[in-house]
């Protein structure tokens, strides 16, 4: 078992199978053999969204945080399917988080912290990344969050 998978196990996290794309795209795309771009992931667990709706009206910041954390777990599942071993990750370069926001909601950073804090818990310094946390008027399937990442791999 890899170090990262051991850390996930210690945190009580079992990676699901990588979610299948909902439309015409690939879940992850390698570039120059050491960068991986991961398509947007939502907060599904076993194929069902754990939350639906807008943060700030239908959901609390805390629920949005949990949704963001689940979206990152799904992102890790996609990465594992793409690269085989999460120990190959050199560091997370960028995280882009979209929040399905109620009018006037401005606490996007606290919602996307669910994903960011999970990366730091699991990967330590390698999990620290640049980030944008943006509002969206609507997101596909009424998910409260969508997360994209760019990851750099160790040289092979």
Image (cartoon, rainbow, N blue to C red):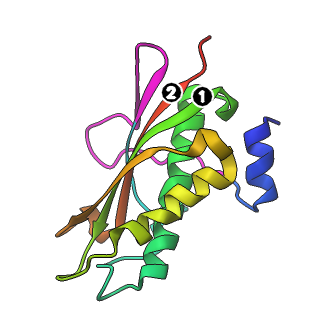
Main SS of residues in magenta: loop
Residue 35 located within the stretch drawn in magenta: yes
Q: Residue 148 lies in magenta, yes or no? A: no
Q: CA distance from mark 1 to mark 2?
A: 6 Å
Identify the residue shown where x is 77% and y is 49%: 7
Q: Quadrant of the C terminus?
A: top right
Q: How many marks?
A: 2
Image coords of residue 17 (percent x, y): 59, 47
Q: Which residues are magenta?
A: 15-37
- The 10 Å Cα crowd at callout 1, few under 14, some 14 to 19, many 20 or more, is some
* Image height of 10 relative to 89, above or below: below
Q: Answer with left or right where residue 105 lies relative to residue 145.
A: left
**Residue under pointer 1:** 90
Q: Which secondary structure lies at badge 2?
A: strand
> Percent from the top left, x then y, of residue 71?
47, 58
> Mark 1 and 2 residues: CB-CB less than 8 Å, in contact?
yes
Residue in the image at 29% along x and 88% along y: 57
Please name the residue shown 48% across and 72% down the image.
Answer: 65
**Residue under circle 2?**
152
Q: Tell me: residue 151, above or below residue 140.
A: above
Asked if one can make out residue 26 in the rendered structure from this viewpoint, the answer is yes
Q: Residue at x 79, y 38 (%)?
A: 3
């Amino acid at each position: 078992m890899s170090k990262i998978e051991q850390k996930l196990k210690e945190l009580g996290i079992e990676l699901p199978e990588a979610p299948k794309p909902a439309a015409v795209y690939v879940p992850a795309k390698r570039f120059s053999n050491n960068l991986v771009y991961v398509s947007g992931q939502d907060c599904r667990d076993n194929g069902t969204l754990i939350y639906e709706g807008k943060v700030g009206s239908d959901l609390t910041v805390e629920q949005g945080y949990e949704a963001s954390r689940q979206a990152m777990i799904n992102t890790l599942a996609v990465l594992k399917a793409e690269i085989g071993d999460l120990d190959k990750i050199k560091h997370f370069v960028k995280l882009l988080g979209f929040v399905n926001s109620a009018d006037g909601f401005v606490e996007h950073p606290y919602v996307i912290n669910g994903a960011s804090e999970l990366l730091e818990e699991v990967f330590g310094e390698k999990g620290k990344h640049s980030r944008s946390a943006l509002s969206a008027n609507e997101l596909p399937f009424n998910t409260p969050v969508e997360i994209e990442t760019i990851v750099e791999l160790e040289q092979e």
